[in-house]
Amino acid sequence: MSTDKNRATAAAILPLVGGPDNITSIAHCMTRLRISLRDRSLVQDEALRALPAVLGVVEDDTYQIVLGPGAVARVTPEFEALVEEARSAAPAAAPSAPPSGGITAGDLAAQGAALKEAQKSRNATPFKLFLRRIANIFVPLIPALIGCGIIAGLNGLLTNLGWVPAVVPALAAIASGFMSLIAVFVGYNTAKEFGGTPVLGGAVAAIIVFPGVAKIDAFGLELKPGQGGVLGALAAALLAVYVEKWCRSWVPEALDVLITPTLTVLISGLVTLFGLMYLAGEASSAIGTFANRLLAGGGAFAGLVLGGLFLPLVMLGLHQALIPIHTTLIEQDGYTVLLPILAMAGAGQVGAAIAVYYRLPRNASIRATVKSALPAGFLGIGEPLIYGVSLPLGRPFVTACIGGAAGGAFVGLFHQLGVAFGSTAIGPSGWALFPLLDGRAGAGITLAIYAGGLLVGYLVGFVATYFFGFTRQMLADLDTDPGPDPTTATEAPPKERVPA
């Protein structure tokens, strides 16, 4: 079946299932395209059955369109691409004009949403979209990384205290089991993200962690189980996707179920064993060496740069490139030394938001937004403060970055002094990172340094914003009573104002 025919089939199916907005998930098995729907009533069953490529329709936990072996693997990527294209092309609603009488939190939120949408459009470059897809591979793994990281920390604490020795081996097994097989999960998610069969990606990646690879002589180079880690798994699964698609371009549909998976695993497996494992192993070692030397040799300056530039990196979408680096460091050393430093950007953001609160005593709407978003900010969830307060205001976003730079320099300085530590998982930040911290100097010193970094970030972010975050004109425009915020106002008496 040609690519044009596959796309035509996908294009014919899409409107008959309610369009892209009616679809919440897409998957396929050996013969069926499986989709989850928001509104089942929008589906045109009879019209679907009448399509030449559709062999039948089955309704279970998902809506299943029977396309047959071989055909479904070709149509599904085209269907996913059409859904994504339609959603990307949907126009964003323009923010409403601010009301007269002052600027409210709703106005800032509208400006922040517009800025976020504009930045999202600018981020839609091939390179940044590729980084986003890489992030999509690792983000589903974060819950397991967090759970296993906390258990590993608890196990270390019990070991140091000498408590419950019988429990320690059990906790070690629970904490380490996922990490020993993380390459398989990365391979599975990589194939899924790039349009291949997920289990084939997982099968190829599993070669990396198979103990028997130690018996293979790859051109005089001894292989070790796990060599290459998550980078090798990602590369191996990505290769498997391309091999699979190549096979589907010429293998007859009747033989697809036998020939395609066999050739995919065989070709990708051989290339992995005799090339990718070694190259990815060298790359992983280089990443670990570079990160540790960077902080050991110039920790204060490196921390200042990393902490100060992280918020702009998030805006540009480039922070997603750090996710496989974090995961590689965790796999090698047990923790990533970069995350506690990058978390200081959130501390600077919190300090800046508190300064905004005190600099605008008459604007109850913005103050209420800051007050409601601060608890999330302390826990490392900075988006409400970024897009609701600091970024729309402009200068407070810059001063927040200054606070993050100061906190990063503080933490980096201790790395330079030999007190190395990091996070055993990615995802959490702020106060939520405390249970995941681990280091060579012991829990007490590690927690104290991280807490000190947060306090420095809060303080410098606050001071920089309080004194340099507003011009006189900004204060004249912002430090007024804006009246009711139309985004949150209710049926209240005329003189009663409902804060945002």
Image (tube, rainbow, N blue to C red):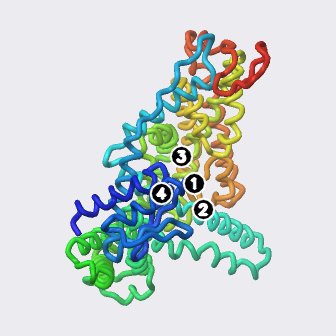
**Mark earlier in primary sequence (4, 3):** 4
- Give the quadrant of the N terminus: bottom left
Secondary element under disc 2, as helix, strand or loop, is: helix
Secondary element under disc 3, as helix, strand or loop, is: helix
Secondary element under disc 4, as helix, strand or loop, is: loop
Whether residue 228 is visible, yes or no, is no
**Mark earlier in primary sequence (2, 1):** 2
| Residue identified by numbered label 1 | 427
Circle on res. 342: 3
Binning the other alpha carbons within 10 Å of mark 2 as few (below 14), some (14 to 19) or many (20 upward) gives few
Secondary element under disc 1, as helix, strand or loop, is: loop
- Percent coordinates x, y for residue 373 in the rendering: 67, 36
- CA–CA distance in space, label 4 to label 1: 38 Å
Three-letter amino acid code of the residue under disc 1? Gly
Displayed quadrant of residue 362: top right
> Label 2 near label 4: C-beta < 8 Å?
no
Circle on res. 143: 2
**Mark earlier in primary sequence (2, 3):** 2
Q: Select label 4 or label 3 by which is in front.
A: 4
Q: Select label 2 or label 1 by which is in front.
A: 2
- Percent coordinates x, y for residue 293 in the rendering: 44, 55
- CA–CA distance in space, label 2 to label 1: 8 Å
Three-letter amino acid code of the residue under disc 3? Leu
Residue 472 is left or right of residue 481, and the answer is left
- Give the quadrant of the C terminus: top right
Three-letter amino acid code of the residue under disc 2? Pro
- Percent coordinates x, y for residue 50 in the rendering: 36, 65
Q: What residue is shown at x 62% (from left), y 45% (from top)?
A: 380
Circle on res. 43: 4
